[in-house]
Amino acid sequence: MNKKQDPAEGSKFEILFVGRSNVGKSSLIRELTGKKVRVGKRPGVTLKPSHLRFSDMLITDLPGFGFMSGIKERKQDIVKDKIVRYIEDNTDRINVAVLVIDGSVFMDVADRWDARGEIPIDVELFHFLNELDIDTIIAVNKIDKIKSEDLNVTLNCIAQRIGLIPPWQQWPQTIAPISVKKNDTTSVKELIRKRLHDAKRDDLFRYI
Ligand SMILES: Nc1nc2c(ncn2[C@@H]2O[C@H](COP(=O)(O)OP(=O)(O)OP(=O)(O)O)[C@@H](O)[C@H]2O)c(=O)[nH]1
Ligand SMILES: [Mg+2]
């Protein structure tokens, strides 16, 4: 059998994109790299991480978890397990994680989890990444859907909920409000580049 080459082999810098389904992970990767990432026809159907390779940089798009219309709870658990396993198995290789959240619905979704006495999965994931010492950027996407006068309050609430003491501007290395739709992704791009620079990998700037 013809074995496909492992895209991760020999990679020296991995950027991981993770987040709930439908938050705009794949759109963000496309906007940042100009490369189209393969997306399943239905959200949540793809169980495998998909990779892009630029020189020795690996960009990984993990399947989205949560909100998956028509998909049974058990399958959602399988997705969550796969995500956790991928992160655990590759901790040493992952240089940066970009946790993408949908800023326009985050508080509503988090409140619903709270009402059930559960920790929102995004919040849980942020702590999990922290525990593993993985440098994490929180890309708050879809800010085009938030009224401009509400933006600061919303970002403060999100920060608070995640466990970062507001005001959100206190976390300029971590919180990046963006709108992929409006091609406004400079803040997250700058933060990723900062990590590349710190790793002495300015040569990779041309891909991001
Ligand atoms: N309004 C608005 N919509 C956006 C933005 N970014 C992405 N979207 C839309 O959100 C939807 C989901 O985007 P995807 O990039 O497929 O999301 P994903 O996180 O990769 O989803 P999964 O692969 O299911 O996990 C698409 O319809 C996008 O066009 C944004 O900044 N603003
Ligand atoms: Mg996707």
Image (cartoon, grey):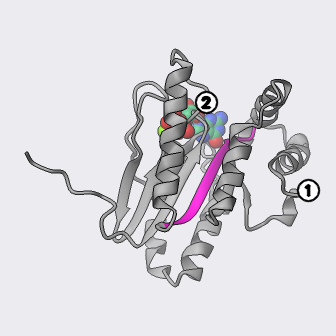
Residue closest to the far bottom: 200
Q: Which residue is mark 1?
A: 166
Question: Where does label 2 land, which residue?
Answer: 66
Name which residue type carries label 1. Answer: Pro
Instruction: State whether residue 129 is above or below residue 113.
Output: below
Magenta segment main secondary structure: strand
**Callout 2 amino acid:** Gly
Q: Residue 202's spot in the image, x, y percent? A: 50, 81
Question: Which quarter of the picture shows residue 136?
Answer: bottom right
The picture places residue 157, in percent across and down from the top left corner, at 88, 45
Is label 2 in a helix, a strand or a loop?
A: loop
User: Which residue occupies 48% across, 45% down?
Assistant: 62
Point out the image quarter for the N terminus: top left
Vertical comparison of 155 with 66: above or below: below
Examine the rendering and report whether any part of residue 114 can be seen.
yes
Which residue extends farthest left?
1
Residues in magenta, as a range = 94-103
